[in-house]
Each structure stands twice: as C-alpha cells, then as structure tokens.
Amino acid sequence: MKKSHEIDQRVKCDIIDSINGDGYGAELKTVTQKIEFLRRAFEADYGWAIGRYGKQEATRKWLHGLPITADIPIKDCDILENAVEIGILPANAMEKQKGKFLASYWNFLWYLMQCKVISL
C-alpha cells in the first residue's frame, strides 16, 4: 500500500479532476473555479440540510445522492477498484476489509472533500 501522503495527494487530484460544470453550463478551468463551483452547488442543493442534519451528514447525503457536479465512483465494484488503484486497499484485500471500506466510503469521501479538498 502507498503512503498516506501519496494517497491524500492522489485522491485530492482525482476529486478535483472529477468536478465539472457540464450539467450547469459552467466552464471550469482552474482549481479555484472548480472548488468554488462545488461549494456553491452544495449550498444550493443541500444548504437547507445543514441545519437539519449537520454539515457532515448533509454533505454525505448530498454525495450519496449523486450530485452531477462531480463524477465519483458509486458502484461497489468501482469504489473497490478505485481504492485498489489509489492504494487505499491492497489488491488482495480480504472480503472483510472490502466490506469495512465500503461501509465507511461515504464518510471517508466526506472527510476527503471537507479536509483535503475544500471546506464545504
């Protein structure tokens, strides 16, 4: 498995690369534009949920609801394949490891979005 710093950098780049404004007719060329666009999209789509669920749960629900602003893996097989490719899971991960990772995926994604990429 890769070192934590390498994984953080790879995931950060993958998340930023996945942000697109196509569904909104927005052309995003810079990292700053992408991050600000994602923040505004979250606030417009799920800002109401922050008071109801808290920021973490609202963000997790928004991500789980497949926002069109970011192309993130959503199927278990794609999530696991991506985790192996990035180095989060070993290629020979046991079923228990895979299950544990899948169970925490949306919270893990929230953490990465919140702490490593942007502050929603």
Image (cartoon, grey):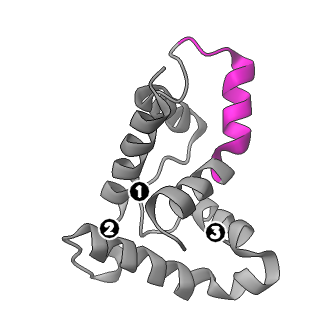
Q: Which residue: 47% across, 67% down? A: 118
For disc 2, the marked residue is 20
Q: SS class of the residue under badge 1?
A: loop
Question: Decide: marks 1, 2 in contact (CB < 8 A)?
Answer: yes
Q: Quadrant of the C terminus?
A: bottom right
List x then y, in percent, for residue 44. 53, 88
Mark 1 is surrounded, within 10 Å at the Cα level, by few (under 14), some (14 to 19) or many (20 or more) other residues, namely some
List x then y, in percent, for residue 87. 46, 27
Camera-near label (2 vs 3) is: 3
Q: Amino acid at mark 2?
A: Asn
Q: Which residue: 41% across, 28% down? A: 85
Q: Amino acid at mark 1?
A: Asp
Mark 2 is surrounded, within 10 Å at the Cα level, by few (under 14), some (14 to 19) or many (20 or more) other residues, namely many
Q: Is residue 107 left or right of residue 31?
A: right
Task: Please tell me whether the stretch drawn in magenta is mainly helix, strand or loop.
Answer: helix
Q: SS class of the residue under badge 3?
A: helix
Q: Quadrant of residue 77?
A: top right
**Sooner in the amino-acid sequence: mark 2 or mark 3:** 2
Q: CA distance from mark 3 to mark 1?
A: 15 Å
For disc 3, the marked residue is 59
Q: CA distance from mark 2 to mark 3?
A: 18 Å
Q: Is residue 80 left or right of residue 33?
A: right
The answer to whether residue 83 is above or below residue 63 is above
* Residue situated in front as seen by the camera: 107 or 24: 107
Q: Which mark is residue 71?
A: 1
Residue span colored magenta? 92-106
List x then y, in percent, for residue 9. 38, 44
